[in-house]
Image (cartoon, grey):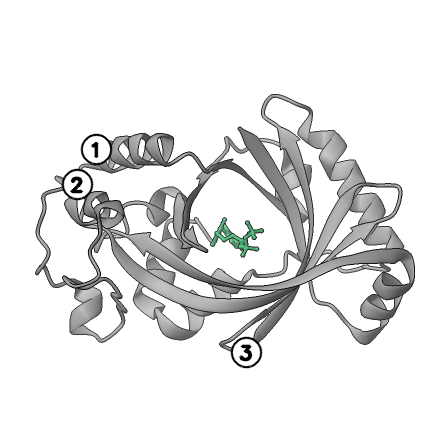
Amino acid sequence: MSVEVERKFICTDETLRILEQTADCVRQREFHDQYFDTADFGLTLQDFWLRKRKGSWELKCPMSRGQAKVEALCTRYREITDLAEIQLRVREVLKDEGSTPQRNKNQKTDGDVDGQNQSVTSDESETQDEMWINELNLKCFAEFTTIRRSFTLKEDAVQVDLDQADFGYSVGEIEVLVSEGRDVLSALEKIEKAAQKLGLTGNQKIPGKMYIYLQRYLPKHYDALMKAHVL
Ligand code: V4E
């Protein structure tokens, strides 16, 4: 299992210039993300982020807090991509949270009432792959498309992504993947070094795409996460 340590940044013209001069542009791709949760935010309130990207399921799981230095500018999450493991973890999280998942495809959520929820699954499109989603009363609450340009910083093996989301938000991220159990601080040092190379001076955490999406389009969900100190 891998741990993703990353720092977001706003990419100015100057940052882009440095990046283009000092890094290899690895590739450009486009992907569509769908994020899922229960109507009472059973996953995200516990900082679990379940999404489907290019037909594959991914779960980002929180790690115990503690290293203030990491939390100041960066985030770190354990990433699970094995579907059986994702299902197991999601079931555990929802059980702990006290949800009683039952198959109920027609259930309306608060979000539906307010027009906030954007469920995309339908009876017609239900496949075997989606049965567990319905069984656990999970709904797609957010979806957007991102154009991503990826760079690799020479020498450091650090990846830098420039994301442009289709709802009008652009953000960069410096990302290092480490194996679970390995020193996260070494990842942090790599990120700091990369940030210096790119001339990033800000000392404020920059919001990611989902943060802005929630703030703009799902205020109730956003408020709940802010109140719970997840965001
Ligand atoms: C972890 C998380 C979310 C999931 C999306 O994570 P992110 O890395 O922003 O998305 P993306 O597309 O860059 O994924 P990648 O391709 O790198 O795997 S949505 C919200 N969070 C948590 C979070 C938080 N706790 N606080 C803040 C300020 N932002 C996000």
- In primary-sequence order, the first of circles 2 and 3 is 2
> Where residue 166 sits in the image (x, y, percent)?
51, 75
Q: From mark 1 to mark 3, how far is it between C-alphas?
A: 36 Å
Q: From the viewer's side, name the closer residue of 27 and 190.
A: 27
> Where residue 29 sits in the image (x, y, percent)?
61, 63
Q: From the viewer's side, name the closer residue of 205 and 52.
A: 52
Q: From mark 1 to mark 2, how far is it between C-alphas?
A: 6 Å
What kind of residue is marked 1?
Lys
Q: From the viewer's side, name the closer residue of 15 and 205.
A: 15
- Which dot marks residue 3? none
Residue situated furthest right in the rendering: 21
Residue 57 horizontal side relative to residue 161, left or right: left
Residue 217 occupies which quadrant of the picture? bottom left
Residue 23 occupies which quadrant of the picture? bottom right
- Residue denoted by label 1: 95
Q: Are marks 1 and 2 in contact (CB under 8 Å)?
A: yes
- Local packing at callout 3 (Cα closer than 10 Å; few below 14, some 14-19, many 20+) is few
Q: Is residue 151 above or below residue 220?
A: above
Indicate the secondary structure of the residue bearing disc 2.
Answer: loop
Q: Is residue 2 above or below residue 18?
A: above
> Where residue 185 sits in the image (x, y, percent)?
72, 31
Q: Is mark 1 within 8 Å of ligand 1?
A: no
Residue at left offset 79%, top offset 39%:
190
- Residue denoted by label 2: 99
Indicate the secondary structure of the residue bearing disc 1.
Answer: helix
What kind of residue is marked 2?
Ser
- Residue denoted by label 3: 168
